[in-house]
């Protein structure tokens, strides 16, 4: 181990550390002679826990400080849940690898009810995701959606303290942390299409850092990457704000990808859905976005952007 260490910037939540350790283990397997170390740090997103993310500046908060650490050469690579990575990276940064996708579905977790259909009238469901809220309310407008933030353990504890009849979380996060047995029901894609990138761990580094690109690039999964590219092209084209419920999920079918997308209103009253199939990830992402935009999502998104500009966020 004569070379300098490969430093992984990571947040310190249990989920972030699991993901960073997972990447570190894969890197050590692929490159036994490289000294892989973690550089844990706290981000703005971890500090501001009392307000909905949409109000405090959006999900980019969780990764900005990791990117700065790389730019300042305090770390070489950052490990992210791709779901938390904005559709545009800062200039000079690249995605060196996307790992094989875990279960991308949303999970319904409840102590008393087997799924969202069997919840009583007016039941209280915890989620701070406008995307989950929109799709849930589209099926069950009677339900009361109550904000729920914090890391995975905190959210489960709040459910156990009876503050909610049920909560909705990403299945991938629960499974990674050993909470698969808490999942009451896996919600199918027709009823809760996941966030763009959900279930995929990605590795970011400087575009001109040949060594990190090469070392991390060994972990890249071609299918994951193509799916994530299609989903991210879709989200980028929509130019949604953090007040915008947007879902996107791609799957490989032979040489092609099938991309599904949803754009809706917070209350689930309006919902635009579509599916496109094709070979080129970026092309189908743009094609699906344009289809939904011309069906009426353009007006909806413009309203949401205006509202979020008023709230003083992006
Ligand atoms: N928003 C936080 C976050 N970022 C990634 C995951 C889950 C893991 C993944 O999707 O890869 C979660 C938790 C959740 O939404 O329940």
Image: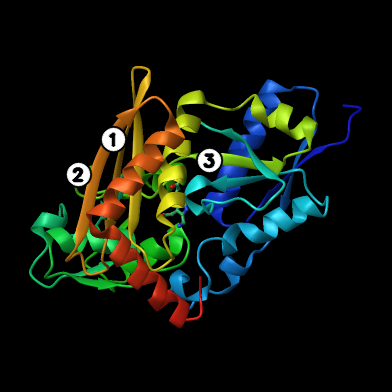
Frontmost of labels 2 and 3 is 2
Percent x, y of residue 121? 7, 70
Q: Secondary structure at mark 2?
A: loop
Does residue 197 show up? no
Residue at position x 31%, y 50% from top? 182
Say which mark, if any, is on residue 276. 1
Does residue 90 show up? yes
Q: Residues within 10 Å of mark 1 (few under 14, many from 20)?
A: some
Q: CA distance from mark 2 to mark 3?
A: 23 Å
Q: Residues within 10 Å of mark 2 (few under 14, many from 20)?
A: few
Query: Which numbered disc flags the more N-terminal residue, 2 or 3?
Result: 2
Residue toward you, 50 or 94 = 94
Say which mark, if any, is on residue 201. 3
Residue toward you, 123 or 78 = 78
Q: Is residue 64 above or below residue 184?
A: below
Query: Which numbered disc flags the more N-terminal residue, 1 or 3?
Result: 3
Disc 3 Cβ-to-ligand 1 distance below 8 Å: yes
Q: Quadrant of the image for the N terminus? A: top right
Left of 98 or right of it: where is 111?
Answer: left
Query: Which numbered disc flags the more N-terminal residue, 1 or 2?
Result: 2
Which residue has dot 2 on it? 190
Q: CA distance from mark 1 to mark 2?
A: 15 Å
Left of 166 or right of it: where is 153?
Answer: right
Q: Secondary structure at mark 3?
A: strand
Left of 177 or right of it: where is 21?
Answer: right
């Amino acid at each position: 181990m004569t070379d300098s260490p490969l430093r992984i910037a990571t947040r310190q939540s249990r989920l972030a550390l699991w993901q960073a350790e997972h990447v570190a283990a894969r890197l050590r397997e692929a490159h036994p002679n490289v000294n892989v170390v973690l550089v844990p740090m706290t981000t703005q997103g971890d500090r501001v826990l009392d307000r909905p993310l949409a109000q405090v500046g959006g999900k980019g908060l969780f990764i900005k400080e990791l990117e700065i650490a790389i730019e300042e050469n305090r770390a070489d690579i950052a490990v992210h849940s791709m779901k938390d990575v904005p559709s545009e990276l800062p200039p000079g940064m690249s995605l060196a690898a996307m790992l094989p996708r875990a279960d991308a579905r949303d999970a319904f977790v409840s102590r008393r009810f087997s799924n969202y259909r069997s919840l009583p009238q007016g039941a209280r469901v915890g989620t701070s995701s406008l995307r989950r809220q929109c799709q849930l309310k589209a099926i069950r407008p009677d339900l009361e959606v109550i904000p729920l933030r914090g890391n995975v353990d905190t959210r489960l504890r709040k459910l156990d303290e009876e503050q909610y009849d049920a909560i909705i979380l990403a299945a991938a996060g629960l499974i990674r942390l050993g909470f698969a047995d808490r999942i009451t029901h896996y919600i199918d894609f027709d009823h809760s299409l996941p966030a763009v990138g959900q279930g995929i761990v990605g590795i970011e580094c400087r575009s001109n850092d040949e060594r990190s690109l090469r070392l991390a690039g060994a972990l890249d999964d071609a299918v994951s990457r193509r799916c994530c590219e299609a989903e991210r092209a879709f989200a980028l084209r929509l130019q949604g704000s953090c007040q915008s419920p947007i879902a996107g999920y791609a799957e490989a079918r032979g040489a092609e990808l099938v991309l599904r997308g949803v754009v809706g209103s917070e209350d689930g009253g309006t919902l635009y859905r579509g599916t496109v199939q094709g070979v080129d990830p970026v092309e189908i992402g743009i094609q699906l976005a344009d289809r939904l935009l011309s069906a009426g999502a353009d007006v909806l998104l413009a309203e949401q952007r205006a509202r979020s500009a008023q709230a003083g966020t992006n």
